[in-house]
Amino acid sequence: RREREHAAALAQALLPPEVRKALASWTAVSVVGLDGVGLVPMAWLPLADEAYLGARRNLESWPSLPVGATLASSSNHRSDRAALDCLLVSGVEPSDQVLARWPGLAPLPLSERDSSALLSPYDEQRVQILTDIAATVSGVTEASGAGATVLHFLVHGVIDVTSPQPACLVLQGEASSDGLFGAHAVSALSPAALVVLAGCRTGAGPERRGDAGSADLAGAFLRNGTQAVVVSHDDITWR
């Protein structure tokens, strides 16, 4: 009950009467500018006699107006002619170079049970798994060329404080790369409709009010033509 009271107070502060009146008839809402107030669970807020704003509406969050405008006008995504329903990248063992900087990272093996659970919604003839030595930066780039509706990373996420684009995925190392996959590498991929970044703090990025997402992984994927990105703003546990 106390939680809902807090939600009602927050809705009162963020949604003026004229906005609440307009929202009553909307079925989709795009939210931008949350970098000024922090991560607000908009879908959780009440609206009039509705317990949750997100119960009857499709809510999406844009990292910035430029990214949102680009996303709305982009015809770059290829989900309509993708060869794969899902490209899964997992089962990575961090390279020695990465372990020297983040010594606590353990290998993330991908069991047959885990892969079956993750890929069960898809046609088994239209999925591809990149694991172990195939799950490199160049391997992902090459595999994405066929086009995938969903690009799913299940890997470690790290924060490289020396980089202006600090959030990175940890892929398998290779001769040309230590395995760190950052925002700069996204533009080489063929865009998927949906990208899932299942790793610790994959949504992290510099705070730039009015231009949130300009230097993080989610913003890089959106600018590249992806329609939606799932990220984590905290550490996650995989079992």
Image (cartoon, rainbow, N blue to C red):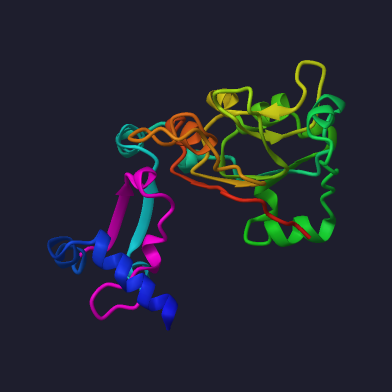
Q: Residue furthest bottom?
A: 1
Q: Position of residue 28 (x, y in %)?
A: 29, 58
Q: Position of residue 180 (x, y in %)?
A: 71, 28
Q: Quadrant of residue 105?
A: top right
Residue occupying the point 62% across, 61% down: 121
Q: Quadrant of residue 98?
A: top right
Is 232 above or below relative to 42? above
Residue occupying the point 32% across, 50% down: 31
Q: Is residue 7 magenta?
A: no
Q: Quadrant of residue 173?
A: top right
Near-viewer residue (216 or 147): 216
Which residues are the magenta region? 26-51
Q: Is residue 29 magenta?
A: yes
Q: Position of residue 166 (x, y in %)?
A: 59, 30
Is residue 80 left or right of 48 when viewed as pictured?
Answer: right
Q: Position of residue 86 (x, y in %)?
A: 62, 47
Near-viewer residue (31 or 154): 31
Q: Quadrant of the C terminus?
A: bottom right
Is 59 above or below relative to 56? above
Q: Quadrant of the N terminus?
A: bottom left
Is 107 above or below relative to 70? below
Residue 225 visible from this viewpoint? yes
